[in-house]
Amino acid sequence: MTRSSSQDPLHGVTLEMLLTRLVEKYGWEELASCIDIKCFANDPSITSSLKFLRKTPWARQKVEALYLHSPWPADDD
């Protein structure tokens, strides 16, 4: 194993997976209130949000931070 993968909490998590989980957990309305991004508030979709987040580093950082600080149940795999 490499150290870099174990040190990166988002290792193996794509932006689409991350955003989908956040939408399932919070819904678009609550996401828009947590992070003031128009693509979450005005006619939101995974596709349009991914397009924006991939081009906007500051917004992606906020979404990743919310994901990392959200409580998630333990995986039962």
Image (spheres, rainbow, N blue to C red):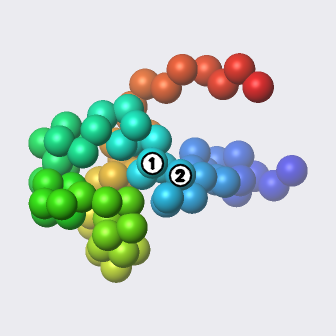
Q: Which mark is residue 17?
A: 2
Which residue is at the front of the view, 48 or 3?
48
In percent of width and height, residue 13 lies at 60, 52
Q: Which mark is residue 31?
A: none
Which amino acid, by three-letter code, is at mark 1? Thr
Residue 16 horizontal/vertical position (percent)? 50, 58
Does residue 65 show up?
yes
Q: Residue at x 45, y 48 (%)?
A: 20
Residue highlighted by disc 1: 20
Secondary structure beneath label 1? helix
Nearest the viewer among 49 and 3 is 49
Outermost front residue: 43
1 and 2 marks in contact (CB < 8 Å): yes
Above or below: residue 12 compared with residue 31: below
For the point 42% across and 51% down, the residue is 19
Position in image of residue 8 (x %, y %): 60, 51
**In the rendered structure, which amino acid carries the disc numbered 2?**
Met
Q: Could you say which quadrant of the image residue 25 lies in? A: top left
- Give the left or right position of residue 38, taking residue 17 as reference: left
Q: Residues within 10 Å of mark 2 (few under 14, many from 20)?
A: few
Question: Where residue 35 sits: x, y (%)?
Answer: 19, 49
Q: Is residue 72 above or below residue 46?
A: above
* Side of 40 where 63 appears, left or right: right
What's the residue at 29%, 54% (across, down)?
62
Q: Residue furthest bottom?
A: 55
- For the point 71% across and 20% down, which residue is it? 76
**Does residue 25 sit above or below 13 in this rendering?**
above
